[in-house]
Image (tube, rainbow, N blue to C red):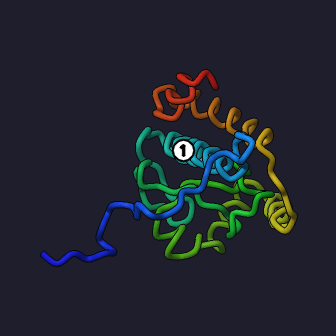
Amino acid sequence: MKHIFWMNKKKNPNAKRRSRRDKKGNLTVSAVKKDTWTIFSRYVRRRDCMATGSFDTGHCITCGKLVEFKNGQAGHMVAGRNNSILFDERIVNLQCYSCNVIKDGDILRYIEVIKSRHGQAVVDEVIAKSHQVKPWNVAELLEQQQLFLTKLAMLDPTDELVVKYQKRGML
C-alpha cells in the first residue's frame, strides 16, 4: 500500500516542541493560557449541556442542533478569540462544528441570541472590549484556571480534568 504523508497520524519526530517553561524554569504564558482554555472550554460545554437537562448533549447556540459534549466546541460571539474577551462566560457557548468553523461562528445569529439573553448593552460592551489589548500573565491565568476548575467540579466532579488537577493538589 502506498504511504500517503498527510494520512500519517504520527507526529514529525524532527519537529520542535514549544517548551512549557522558559529558560529560568517558569511556566510560560502560552502554556498556561492553553491549559486555561482547555478547562474553560470543558466548563462551557458541560454547562450548556446540563442547561438543556442532559449531561452529554446540548444545543448549539446558533442553529439549535443537538451536539454531543465531546464533539461540541466553545464558540465566541466575537471572532478572533481576543484576550480581552477570551474567558467571558456570557459570550462563549456550546456550538456545533458547522456553525463555529464552517460558518465562522455564525456571528449574526450568535449576536441575536446573546442580545435576547443579555440585552444590547452586553453586546455593545463585549464588542467594544474586543478591541482592547489584554496582556495575560501567568498568575492571572492560574487564577482563571482555579475559577473554572471549581465551576467544572461543581458540574461534574468526575471530569478527567477535575480529577487530574485534584491529584496535583490544585483543586
Residue 114: image quadrant is bottom right
Instruction: Please provide percent x and percent y for residue 159.
Output: 47, 32
Front residue of this view, candidates 21 and 39: 21
Front residue of this view, candidates 57 and 22: 22
Q: What's the residue at 81%, 65% (across, down)? A: 130
Is 64 rendered above or below residue 136?
A: below
Q: What's the residue at 64%, 72% (across, down)? A: 107
**Which residue position is annotated with label 1?**
42
| Residue furthest left as drawn | 1
Q: What's the residue at 62%, 33% (across, down)? A: 149
Residue 127: image quadrant is bottom right
Q: The N terminus is located in which quarter?
A: bottom left
Residue 137 lies left or right of residue 37; in this view the side is right
Residue kind at label 1, given as amino acid type: Arg
Instruction: Please provide percent x and percent y for residue 145.
Output: 68, 38
Front residue of this view, candidates 168 and 145: 168
Instruction: Please provide percent x and percent y for residue 151.
Output: 63, 33
